[in-house]
Amino acid sequence: MRRTRRAGRAASWLGVALLAGVPALAGGTAWAQPPSDDDVTAAHAAADAAALDVAGAQARLDAIRVELGRAEAAVQTAAEDYAEAREALAEAKRETVEASARADRAQRAEDDARGMLAEAYRTTARANENGLGPLDVVAGARDVGDVVSTEAAQRAVDRKVAGALARQADVRSAARNADARWQAARAAQQEASTAAEAAFATAQRTADELTARTAAAEDERDRLFTRLADLRSTSVELERRREADRQAQAAAARESAARERAEGAAPAQASADPTPGESREGSGAGSGASGAASHDRERGGDSASGGDERADAPEPRPTRTREPAPDPAPRPAPEPEPEPDPKPDPPPVSGVGQGSAAQGREALAWARSKIGTAYQWGGDGDPGYDCSGLTSGAWNAAGVWITRTSRSQYLTVGKVPYDQMRPGDLIFYANDTSDPSTIRHVAIYAGGGRMVEAPRPGVDVRETPVRWDEVMPYAGRP
């Protein structure tokens, strides 16, 4: 500690002496003992240590940013897991309701079949009571006709009984299958409910950890800013502004590099090549220009040639006369090329994109109308939204149905390169951009390098610059 203080005093003395450029004076008298070599060495060492402390403080601030970014990604991942679990639960509930209805219908059909079977047995019993047994038929018959007609009646009764038995067996089997499916659907619903509750608990815990981590990071930042202010003999506020500028410059560099990667990652699509119509327009313009140039050359060549003929042609022979060739008739000026129609948007690379540009603008307008709405886990607007709840609601409002979760949205919508995005397209973020199952977030493109999103718990729906880091290879077009 004494060495540090000594080094600090030596560093201070050295700084004053260097700034003044003259021996330090105290009361107008030079110090009798200038700093020794050890003092100078200690002063330089202290300055180096201070510089290392500044670098260390800045490195720690960078590490805090990275840690909070990872924590936020974890929250978004947990939120998307919960949204999927909710969708699975909703689907399980629908299946349970349908299975229950099928089981009820099967039970009613089985009851009807039992009734038909009972009626068939009663008919058989009455027939036997009325002497329709085989011996009774023969013994009581007056002629062969009576026997034949009575046997026909018996066969009809037997067919009725057999049909009733077969139908009863079929509907009984169907009822049992329907009941089994209902029981399975109820079990699946229970499992989905348990999974949704677990996913929500994980999401809530992850969000709480982010909140606690953010508070701790703020405290650590304050201490680091105070340390930097001490090291640089500045104010904490100045260090905050200086650090904000440094982080902003670093973020801009990262985003620029990430955007270049994103726009260069998607391979060129075949639809980017000129279409036959576009090729004809291009060749027409080119041929028109070359034709005009050719026409000018012809005109110029004819004129020059004609001039040479008139100037240098020999006298005509007396025995043979030839009329001079008439000048070629002037060609009419070419019609001006009509303005080509604007090129249509290229089709999506893959998936099914059915929304128009107008519907994309409508979806964006709807999403913008929700700016300031609170984030809600799995929210569809009552009262808040999660990320995919916002994007699905926006496109549904524009008349295009898309799925509810960001992962299923990416799999089903059309894919477009980022340099061909238009307002309303979707931007997806993933932990592993080569694996759509790791998608954690989705936003709606607003044009001009901006997007609208429901980012995470504690942050309302907002419009913000596009973040290019960890985007999927393509944007989505519903």
Image: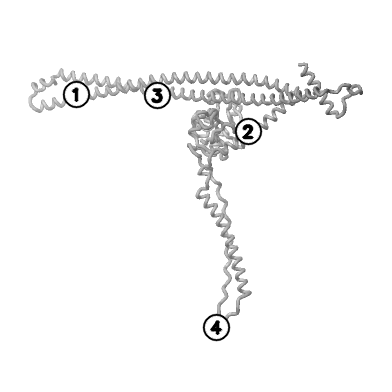
Residue 323 versus residue 23 in the image, above or below: below
Residue 343 versus residue 379 in the image, above or below: below
In the rendered view, does 395 fall on the left or right side of 309?
A: left
Label 2 crowding class (10 Å Cα cut-off): few <14, some 14-19, many 20+? some
Residue drawn at the location 54% of the way across and 52% of the way down: 281
Residue 54 coordinates in the image, percent (x, y): 72, 25
- Residue type, numbered disc 4: Thr
Task: Give how far apart the Cα atoms at labels 1 and 2 are.
Answer: 86 Å
- Residue type, numbered disc 1: Asp
Q: Closest to the observer: 423 or 348?
A: 348
Task: Give how far apart the Cα atoms at labels 2 and 4 are.
Answer: 91 Å
Residue topped by disc 4: 319
Residue 323 coordinates in the image, percent (x, y): 56, 77
The quadrant in which the N terminus is found is top right
In the rendered view, does 187 fall on the left or right side of 446?
A: left
The quadrant in which residue 60 appears is top right
Element under disc 2: helix
Residue topped by disc 2: 254
Task: Give how far apart the Cα atoms at labels 3 and 1 are.
Answer: 37 Å
Task: Give how far apart the Cα atoms at labels 4 and 3 are.
Answer: 111 Å
Residue topped by disc 1: 158
Q: Are marks 4 and 3 in contact (CB under 8 Å)?
A: no
Residue 334 versus residue 77 in the image, above or below: below
Which label lies toward us, 2 or 3? Answer: 2
Q: Closest to the observer: 16 or 82?
A: 16
Identify the mark nearer the N-term, 3 or 1. Answer: 3
Identify the mark nearer the N-term, 4 or 3. Answer: 3
Which label lies toward us, 1 or 4? Answer: 4
Q: Are marks 1 and 2 in contact (CB under 8 Å)?
A: no
Element under disc 3: helix
